[in-house]
Amino acid sequence: MKILVINAGSSSLKYQLIDMDKEEMLCKGNCERIGIPGGIFTHKTADGRELDKKVNMIDHTAAFTQVKDALLDAEYGVIKSLDEITAIGHRVVQGGAIFHKSELVDERVIQDIESLIPLAPLHNGAHVQGIRACRELFGDKVPEAVVFDTSFHATMPPKAYMYNIPYEYYEKYAVRRYGAHGTSHRYVSARCAELMGQDPKDLKIVTCHLGNGSSITAVDGGKCIDTSMGLTPLDGFMMGTRSGTLDPSVVTFVMEKEHLTPGEMDQVLNKKSGLLGVSGVSSDDRDVTAARKQGNERAKLAQDILEYQISKFVGGYMVALGGCDAIVFTAGIGENQTAHRAAVCQQLAFMGVKMDPQKNEEMVRGKEGEISTPDSPIKVFVIPTNEELVIARDTKALVEAMR
């Protein structure tokens, strides 16, 4: 059984074609900087063939076209026909109060995902684009499944997911913390336990998914007890274009001063804030890093804020967990930005975190392993996330259940 996994982020689209008989990846790729000038498309096969090109992708539909062409390419492809693909699994950020588990796709499911776009404005719309493009390409013969990031966070207790607003809004509109990146947090927390040679039930882990969209989760005994994203992926700490947590009065104050509509303010908070808003350079941390090296003070400020806020969330979740056995860094920034990891661990040194500088510098570009010193009471790991495998497993189970 070959399953194509589509994992769309706010400015990226990762994919893998996985042979589920052996859980072997046949090829994988990434569409980067979607909607941003200087788009990059990479495609790698398991036997070492690599396609790397610059191509502007105005939206996720355009990115999916690149994926399809690469899979069938005479030189870089891994299948002769699209008929070889048994099923397709899609990552969906927000399932809201509608979805609590993975589901097979039909028109009702698509419409329900669309109805949740206000809760994940940078993602759910892109997911729907990808799903509809797949259905048009493959037809009804190929089953498709959706795996929701919010599912992993369903174990949060009410004290973690409720907001300090009139309870009636929870009863009327299900306003609560849902979280996101659950598929990633689910994978890396379980993988961390494997690397430590322990049962997940015996561990307290803080997982840091740091990318263009970022979140941090407290995992106790393999279950989420708190997470930084909230009703929407806007909550938490600074991201590529998102503001993260701020005083609600900032919203009303700016709206009044700038005469903004709610929709316009939503655009400011979701697409014009974060690294982009503070640095004035870019939403991509690599661009901000380059500007910082050239002496750009606003770029430096943006990254200082990012590192400071990550440290505060990690420290807070150690308290929520009542201790901490391990910290995990994952996703684009978490897996590759050694300076950010070092800065965060330095902030947490007083709590027992001891980083090995040499290991930290070595653990980039897909490498997995521990970057803390042998005597560090709190272990620190870099674990490349594999949301695709989790999605493929759920998709396989759903497809087999329908047979």
Image (cartoon, helix red, strand yellow):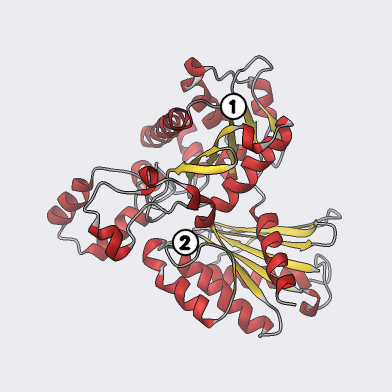
Q: Nearer the viewer, residue 79 or 177?
A: 177
In the figure, is residue 102 to the left or right of 315? right
The residue that mark 1 highlights is 325
Q: Which type of secondary structure does the marked residue at label 1 adopt?
A: loop
Which residue type does callout 1 highlight? Answer: Asp
Residue ID at (36%, 43%): 159
Q: Which mark is residue 54?
A: none
Q: CA distance from mark 1 to mark 2?
A: 29 Å
Residue 393: quadrant of the picture: bottom right
Q: Position of residue 282 (x, y in %)?
A: 44, 48
Mark 2, secondary structure of its residue: loop
**Which circle's residue, 1 or 2, is located before the other in the chain?**
2
Query: Taking 396 as reference, is 347 left or right?
Result: left
- Percent from the top left, x then y, of residue 69? 71, 72
Whether pointer 1 and pointer 2 mark residues with C-beta atoms closer than 8 Å, the reply is: no
Location of residue 97 in the rendering, given as x and y in whole percent from the top left corner = 42, 63
At label 2, which amino acid type do we have?
Answer: Gln
Q: In the rendered image, which residue does mark 2 sit on?
A: 94
Quadrant where the image shows the C terminus: bottom right
Q: Residue at x 41, y 68 (%)?
A: 116
Q: How many marks?
A: 2
Q: Which of pointers 1 and 2 indicates the residue nearer the eye?
A: 1
Q: Bin the neighbour count of mark 1 within 10 Å (Cα to Cα): few under 14, some 14-19, many 20 and up.
A: some
Q: Residues within 10 Å of mark 2 (few under 14, many from 20)?
A: many
**Residue located at (74% from left, 31% from top):** 197
Residue 149 in percent (x, y) is at 53, 56
